């Protein structure tokens, strides 16, 4: 399965063979890094790092050269913020919803069927979760693959 073949890029986990050997939070970080890649702020402005959108008051500017270490720290800061929005859920569900928020935004997640189903205690969310794979209104195979990886690596039934 493609999930197991994600490159483990951090030295701490370089010796591990499978993404499933990592703690769930680290799995989430690796999946995001794999799919977002490191953005060049000259080409992808206002996005930089691993898909971070520049917020008012932040020091970043178009052409800002972000190091991988700085991008990793920013990803983790953003992911922690999104996970905290779902603190009323169990930890694994908050992580899954936080990862989805990282990609589609917390407002869209809070309006989603996935959110409502988990809130109601319904664990049969695969179809609803993988429905979040459209880009400009059309099905996107890469987003579907990402959702499947996130689901398999992070969801606990």
Image (cartoon, helix red, strand yellow):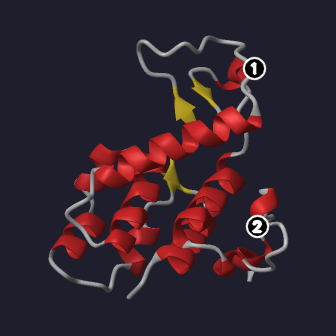
Q: Position of residue 66 (x, y in %)?
A: 72, 25
For marks 1 and 2, the one nearer the N-term is 2
User: Which structural element holds mark 1?
Assistant: loop
Which image quadrant: the N terminus?
Answer: bottom right
Q: Position of residue 49 (x, y in %)?
A: 65, 34
Q: State the separation of the CA atoms marked 1 and 2.
A: 26 Å
Task: Give the number of the disc on residue 65.
Answer: 1
Q: In this view, does 115 lie to the left or right of 48?
A: left
Disc 1 vs disc 2: Cβ atoms closer than 8 Å?
no
Q: Where is residue 84 in the image (x, y as percent from the top left)?
A: 31, 51
Camera-nearest label, 1 or 2: 2
Query: Which residue appears at 19% of the width and 81% of the height?
Result: 121
Task: Give the number of the disc on residue 13.
Answer: 2
Query: Which residue appears at 75% of the width and 37% of the height?
Result: 68
Density class for disc 2 (Cα within 10 Å; few <14, some 14-19, many ≥20) is some
Task: Give the number of the disc on residue 102.
Answer: none
Of residues 99 and 15, the one drawn nearer to the viewer in this rendering: 15
Of residues 74 and 43, the one drawn nearer to the viewer in this rendering: 74
Q: Residue furthest left?
A: 120
């Amino acid at each position: 399965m493609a999930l197991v073949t994600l490159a483990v890029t951090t030295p701490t986990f370089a010796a591990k063979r499978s993404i499933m050997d990592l703690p769930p939070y680290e799995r989430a970080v690796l999946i995001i890094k794999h799919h977002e890649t490191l953005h060049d702020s000259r080409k992808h402005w206002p996005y930089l790092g691993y898909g971070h959108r520049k917020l008012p008051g932040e020091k970043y500017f178009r052409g800002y050269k972000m190091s991988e270490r700085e991008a990793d720290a920013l990803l983790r800061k953003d992911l922690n913020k999104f996970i905290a929005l779902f603190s009323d859920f169990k930890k694994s569900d908050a992580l899954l919803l936080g990862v989805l928020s990282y990609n589609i935004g917390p407002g869209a997640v809070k309006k989603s069927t996935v959110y409502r189903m988990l809130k109601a205690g319904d664990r049969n969310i695969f179809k609803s979760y993988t429905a979040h794979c459209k880009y400009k209104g059309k099905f996107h195979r890469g987003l579907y693959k990402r959702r499947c990886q996130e689901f398999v690596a992070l969801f606990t039934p």
